Image (cartoon, rainbow, N blue to C red):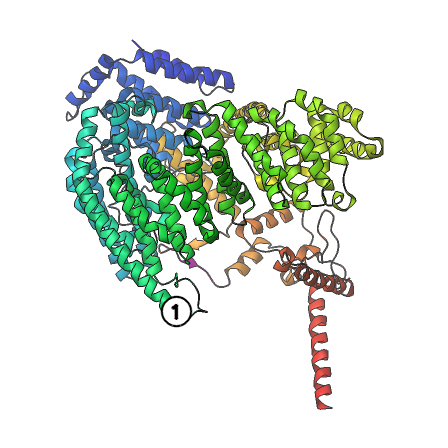
C-alpha cells in the first residue's frame, strides 16, 4: 500500500535545481500512483467522504488516499511554480487512476486548476500543460460531472466572466459522453444565450450581442465531441433529431458542426461493426479506452438502426438546403448526404434519386432553350453569379446525384451515366466539370459499374478529349487514373498497352498545366499509379513499377519540348517518391546529358530538376560511379543557355561537393572550370567560419529552423529557373530524410538543455519574486503565505502595479469594447514624465539626459505603439539633423511603392525613377532640419504656382 510519507519525500525533491532529480522524482511519482493505488484504497476514501458529506464535523481522521490527494494538490502551491509543468503531469496521472472517483478526492485540485487559468501570461508559461491536465480531468470525470465542478459560468450577467477557455478543452477531450446531457443542458443554455443576445441588441450593445452569438456557436461546437463514442445514441437520437433539423433550417452557421457530428456517428459505428472493435480502442489513447470499449457489436448495431430510421428526415432537410443554398462550405452537406445514403433504406434513396433526376431533366431542357435563344456571338455559359440560372441549378443537381451514389443499385447508376454523357461535351465549363466529377465518383465507388462499362468508358474518354474544358481537366485526370489502374490489373485486353500509353501521355502533359490544382493533381496521380503498380498490398509488383517508369521515360523521345520537359518532370517525381527507381533512373543519364545540350530552356530546366533529385536521393556509391559523366554533362553547354542556368548548375555542383567530397569532384573537374570549384570551396569555408562564430543560441535557432522543414515534394523549388546560392544546404536537406533525422535528435537535445536553463532561471526568479512592499499593498492586512488563493492574487496585484508604474500608455477600453480617449492626456503625461525639462524640450529638442532614461522612454513609446518623432536626430547647438552612432541616417527613407514588386519592368522602372527623385531631394535638403525642409518645399510649390499663373496671364 502506498504511503503519503513516501510521496511527501518525493515532493520535497521536485523544487530541486537539478533537472535529472526533477525528472526522476516525477517518473517515480507517476509509477507509484499507477501501481500502488488500488480499488480498495480508493473505495475506502470515497465511502468516508460520502458518510461525512453532510456532517458538520468529522470525528475520524483522513484516510490514506485522502492524504495522498492532499499531497498531490500541494504541488500547485507557489513554491512549486518552477516545476508546475511536471506537477500537471503527476495530477493528470492521478485523474487517470481515480476515474469517476476523482470528483470526491480531487475536487479542490480541479478548482485550483481553474483558478490558475487567471494567472497572467508573464508569470505562467505552462498554459498548454494546464489545459492538458484539465483535459485529463474531463476524460476521467466525463463532461457532465466536470462541468458541475468547474462550470462554464454562462449564467453570469457579464459575458467576460464566462470560462470560454474550457470550450477547446471540452472539444478535444470529451469521449463517451451522454447525448441526453447535451440536449437537456447545453441546448437549454443555447436558448438562454440567444435571448440574452437579442436583449443586448435591442439595448444597443452591439459588441456584447456579437459576443453572445459567439458563445452560441461555441456551445454548438461541442456537439461533435458529445457524439464521439456517445453512450446513449440509440436512446436519445430520436429526441435530438427535431432540434438538429430545426437548427439546420434556421441557423446556417452551425450546419457544418451538425453535419460533422452526424458523419462521426455513422463512421464510428460502421468501423466498430466492420472491424469488430479491434483497432478502435487505441484510436484515442489509453485514457479513453474504457469509453471506447463500451462500443460492442450490439451497441453499434442498435445505433446504426436508429440512424437508419432518422436518415429519411435528415436527407430531406439536407437535400433541400443544398439545392437552395448559395454554396456548400467545405462540402459538408454533400459528404453528410453521402454518409446517410449509404445507411438509409433503399426505398428512401430511390425516391430521392428519382426526384433529383426528374429535376435534372427539366433543368437540362431549360438550359438548352436558353442556349438556343442566345445570339451566335453571345457568351457560351450562363451568368454564374445568378443562383437561379439553369447552369448553376444543373450543377447542384449533378452534385446531389453523386452524393446519393453509395445507396444506388447498378441500374440507377446506369441511368446517371447516360445523363452525364452529353454533359461531358457541354459548351459550359462548369457543367463539364460537374459531369467529370460525378464520373470519377462512380468509378471510385462502384467496381461493378467499371467492369461492366469498361469498353464504353474507354471509347467515351477518347471521344470527349477534344472538347474538354481546362476547368474540368483535374477531374478528368482522376477518371483516367481509375481506368489505368483497372486496365493494369486486367490482362485480358489486348489493346491494354496502347490505351494505357495514350492515357498516361495525357497525365504527363498535365504536369505542365497552368492551373496549379490540375498540375498538383497530375503529380499525385502519377505517384498513385506507381503505388498501385509497385505495392504488394494492392496486388502490384516491383516489375510493374519498373515497366511503368520506362513508359514515362519514353516521353524523353518526344518530338516537342513540351512533351520532353513534362516527361523529365514525371521521372523526377517518381525517382523522388520511390527509392527503388533511383538506380533505374541512372539509365536515362546519357539521354539527359544530350538534352542539356539542346538550345531550349524548357527542356534544360526540367532535366536539371531531374539531376537535382538524383543527386539528393542517391547514395554516395552511385554518385561516385557516375560523378565524372555528371560533372562533364553539367559543364558541356551551349553558350546562349549557359548564362541563364549558371546559378542552378553551381547549386548542383555544391550538392555534389557536399555528398562526394571536394577532392572527388576536383579529380573529375576540367581544368578550365577549376575557378568555379575554387569559388565553391571558398564560399563553403566562409559559411563554416560564420557558423562557427555564431553563439549557442543562434545555432539552436538554426537547428530548429532546419528541422521544421518536412521532406516533401516541391516541384516549384526543384524546377525553378535559377538556384539560390544562399539556400544550397536547404536544397539537399529538405529532400534527404536521413539528415533530417540526425538534425532532429540534435535539435531535441538543444531544446532540452534550453528548457533546463529556462527552468533554473524561473526558479531563481521565483525566489526573488516577492516584493518587499507587498505588505503595504494589502491595506495592513497580514498576508497568509500558506493560502494559495491569496498568494496568487497578491502576486497578480503586485505585477499589475509594476506594469502600471512602468507604462501609463495602455489603451483604456470600456465594457462595450469601445476605445476611451482622454483629450490632452498625452501631453500632460509627456510633460510630467520630464519635470526637469524647459520650454525648449516641449518644442521637440532633447536636453541632457542619461542614456538609460532615453532608452526607457523609447521602450515605452514602442510598447504603446507611438511613432518616432525624429527628435533624437535634432541638434542642441545648431539647426539641422545630426548623424547618430548606430542609427539610421536622418534622410534614409525608402518610399512604400507597390510597383516595386510588380512583374512588369516598366512599373518597376517608374518606381525607381521615384526613388531617384527622393535621393535628389535628399542632397538638396542636406543639413536642414525637418521643419525648414518642409517650409522650403512649400515655398517652391508656391513659386511654381505663381509662374504657372503668369504664363496663363500672358
| Placement of 443 over or under 199, stated as above or below | above
Q: Is residue 101 visible?
A: yes
The spot of residue 830 in percent (x, y) is 57, 57
| Placement of 52 over or under 950, stated as above or below | above
SS of the residue under disc 1 = loop
On the rendered image, what quadrant is the C terminus found in? bottom right
Locate residue 698: give its quadrant.
top right
Of residues 710 and 33, the one drawn nearer to the viewer in this rendering: 710
Residue 820 within the magenta-colored segment of the rendering: yes
Query: Residue at point 31% right, 48% down?
Result: 418
Q: Which residues are magenta?
A: 817-824
Query: Residue at point 51% right, 52% down?
Result: 809
Query: Residue at point 39% right, 61% down?
Result: 384
Locate residue 900: give its quadrant.
bottom right
Locate residue 367: give its quadrant.
bottom left
On the rendered image, what quadrant is the N terminus found in? top left
The spot of residue 176 in percent (x, y) is 25, 30
Which residue is tagged 1? 374
Q: Residue furthest bottom?
A: 954
Amino acid at each position: 500500500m502506498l504511503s503519503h510519507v513516501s510521496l511527501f519525500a518525493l515532493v520535497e525533491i521536485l523544487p530541486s535545481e537539478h533537472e535529472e532529480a526533477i525528472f526522476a522524482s516525477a517518473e517515480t511519482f507517476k509509477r507509484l500512483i499507477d501501481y500502488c493505488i488500488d480499488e480498495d484504497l480508493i473505495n475506502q476514501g470515497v465511502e468516508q467522504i460520502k458518510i461525512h458529506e453532510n456532517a458538520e464535523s468529522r470525528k475520524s481522521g483522513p484516510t490514506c488516499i485522502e492524504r495522498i490527494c492532499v499531497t498531490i494538490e500541494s504541488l500547485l502551491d507557489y513554491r512549486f511554480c518552477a516545476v508546475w509543468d511536471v506537477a500537471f503531469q503527476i495530477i493528470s496521472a492521478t485523474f487517470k487512476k481515480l476515474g469517476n472517483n476523482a470528483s470526491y478526492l480531487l475536487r479542490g485540485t480541479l478548482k485550483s486548476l481553474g483558478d490558475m487559468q487567471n494567472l497572467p501570461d508573464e508569470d505562467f508559461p505552462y498554459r498548454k500543460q494546464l489545459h492538458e491536465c484539465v483535459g485529463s480531468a474531463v476524460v476521467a470525470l466525463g463532461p457532465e460531472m466536470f462541468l458541475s465542478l468547474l462550470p462554464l459560468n454562462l449564467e453570469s450577467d457579464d459575458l467576460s466572466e464566462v470560462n470560454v477557455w474550457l470550450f477547446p478543452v471540452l472539444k478535444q477531450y470529451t469521449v463517451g459522453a451522454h447525448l441526453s446531457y447535451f440536449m437537456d443542458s447545453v441546448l437549454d443554455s443555447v436558448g438562454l444565450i440567444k435571448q440574452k443576445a437579442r436583449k443586448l441588441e435591442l439595448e444597443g450593445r452591439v459588441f456584447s450581442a456579437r459576443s453572445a452569438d459567439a458563445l452560441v456557436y461555441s456551445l454548438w461546437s461541442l456537439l461533435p465531441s458529445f457524439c464521439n463514442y456517445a453512450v446513449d445514441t440509440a436512446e436519445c437520437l430520436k429526441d435530438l433529431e427535431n432540434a438538429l433539423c430545426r437548427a439546420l433550417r434556421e441557423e446556417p452557421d452551425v450546419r457544418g458542426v451538425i453535419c460533422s457530428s452526424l458523419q462521426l456517428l455513422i463512421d464510428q459505428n460502421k468501423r466498430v461493426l466492420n472491424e469488430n472493435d479491434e483497432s478502435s480502442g487505441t484510436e484515442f489513447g489509453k485514457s479513453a479506452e474504457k469509453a471506447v470499449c463500451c462500443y460492442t457489436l450490439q451497441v453499434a448495431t442498435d445505433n446504426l438502426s436508429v440512424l437508419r430510421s432518422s436518415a429519411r428526415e435528415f436527407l430531406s432537410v439536407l437535400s433541400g438546403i443544398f439545392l437552395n443554398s448559395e454554396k456548400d462550405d467545405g462540402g459538408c452537406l454533400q459528404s453528410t448526404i453521402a454518409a446517410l445514403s449509404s445507411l438509409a433504406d433503399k426505398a428512401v434513396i430511390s425516391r430521392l434519386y428519382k426526384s433529383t433526376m426528374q429535376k435534372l431533366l427539366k433543368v437540362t431542357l431549360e438550359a438548352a432553350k436558353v442556349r438556343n435563344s442566345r445570339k451566335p456571338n453571345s457568351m457560351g455559359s450562363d451568368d454564374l453569379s445568378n443562383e437561379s440560372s439553369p447552369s448553376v441549378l444543373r450543377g447542384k443537381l449533378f452534385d446531389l446525384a453523386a452524393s446519393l451514389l453509395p445507396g444506388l443499385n447498378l441500374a440507377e447508376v446506369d441511368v446517371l451515366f447516360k445523363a452525364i454523357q452529353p454533359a461531358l461535351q457541354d459548351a459550359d465549363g462548369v457543367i463539364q466539370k460537374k459531369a467529370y466529377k460525378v464520373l470519377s465518383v462512380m468509378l471510385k465507388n462502384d467496381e461493378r459499374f467499371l467492369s461492366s462499362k469498361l469498353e464504353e468508358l474507354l471509347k467515351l474518354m477518347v471521344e470527349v478529349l477534344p472538347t474538354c474544358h481546362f476547368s474540368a481537366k483535374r477531374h478528368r485526370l482522376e477518371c483516367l487514373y481509375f481506368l489505368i489502374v483497372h486496365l493494369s490489373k486486367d490482362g485480358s485486353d489486348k489493346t491494354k498497352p496502347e490505351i494505357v500509353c495514350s492515357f498516361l501521355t495525357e497525365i504527363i502533359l498535365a504536369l505542365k498545366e497552368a492551373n496549379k490544382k490540375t498540375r498538383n493533381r497530375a503529380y499525385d496521380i502519377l505517384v498513385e499509379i506507381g503505388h498501385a503498380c509497385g505495392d504488394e498490398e494492392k496486388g502490384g509488383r516491383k516489375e510493374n513499377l519498373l515497366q511503368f517508369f520506362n513508359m514515362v521515360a519514353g516521353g524523353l523521345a518526344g518530338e516537342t519540348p513540351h512533351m520532353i520537359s513534362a516527361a523529365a518532370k514525371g521521372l523526377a517525381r517518381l525517382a523522388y517518391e520511390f527509392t527503388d527507381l533511383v538506380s533505374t533512373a541512372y539509365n536515362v543519364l546519357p539521354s539527359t546529358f544530350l538534352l542539356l545540350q539542346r538550345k531550349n530552356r524548357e527542356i534544360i530546366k526540367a532535366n536539371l530538376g531531374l539531376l537535382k533529385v538524383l543527386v539528393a536521393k542517391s547514395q554516395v556509391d552511385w554518385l561516385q560511379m557516375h560523378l565524372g559523366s555528371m560533372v562533364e554533362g553539367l559543364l558541356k553547354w551551349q553558350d546562349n543557355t549557359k548564362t541563364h542556368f549558371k546559378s542552378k548548375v553551381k547549386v548542383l555542383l555544391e550538392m555534389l561537393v557536399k555528398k562526394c567530397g571536394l577532392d572527388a569532384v576536383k579529380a573529375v573537374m576540367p581544368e578550365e572550370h577549376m575557378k568555379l570549384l575554387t569559388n565553391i570551396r571558398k564560399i563553403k569555408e566562409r559559411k563554416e567560419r560564420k557558423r562557427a562564430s555564431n553563439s549557442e543560441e543562434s545555432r539552436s535557432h538554426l537547428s530548429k529552423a532546419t528541422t521544421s522543414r518536412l521532406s516533401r515534394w516541391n516541384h516549384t523549388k526543384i524546377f525553378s529557373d535559377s538556384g539560390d546560392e544562399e539556400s544550397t544546404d536547404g536544397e539537399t536537406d529538405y529532400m534527404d530524410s536521413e539528415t533530417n533525422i540526425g538534425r532532429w535528435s540534435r535539435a531535441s537535445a538543444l531544446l532540452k538543455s534550453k528548457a533546463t536553463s529556462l527552468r533554473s532561471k524561473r526558479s531563481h526568479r521565483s525566489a526573488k519574486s516577492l516584493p518587499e512592499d507587498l505588505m503595504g499593498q494589502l491595506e495592513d492586512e497580514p498576508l497568509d503565505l500558506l493560502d494559495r488563493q491569496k498568494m496568487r492574487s497578491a502576486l497578480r496585484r503586485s505585477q499589475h502595479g509594476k506594469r502600471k508604474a512602468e507604462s501609463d500608455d495602455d489603451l483604456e477600453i470600456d465594457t462595450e469594447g469601445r476605445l476611451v480617449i482622454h483629450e490632452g492626456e498625452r501631453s500632460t503625461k509627456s510633460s510630467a514624465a520630464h519635470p526637469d525639462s524647459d520650454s525648449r524640450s516641449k518644442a521637440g529638442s532633447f536636453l541632457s539626459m542619461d542614456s538609460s532614461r532615453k532608452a526607457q522612454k523609447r521602450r515605452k513609446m514602442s510598447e504603446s505603439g507611438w511613432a518616432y518623432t525624429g527628435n533624437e536626430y535634432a541638434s542642441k547647438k545648431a539647426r539641422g539633423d545630426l548623424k547618430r552612432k548606430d542609427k539610421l541616417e536622418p534622410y534614409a527613407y525608402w518610399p512604400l511603392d507597390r510597383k516595386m514588386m510588380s512583374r512588369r519592368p516598366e512599373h518597376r522602372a517608374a518606381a525607381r525613377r521615384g526613388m531617384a527623385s527622393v535621393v535628389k531631394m535628399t542632397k538638396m535638403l542636406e543639413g536642414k532640419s525637418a521643419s525648414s525642409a518642409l517650409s522650403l518645399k512649400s515655398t517652391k510649390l508656391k513659386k511654381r504656382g505663381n509662374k504657372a499663373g503668369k504664363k496663363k496671364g500672358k
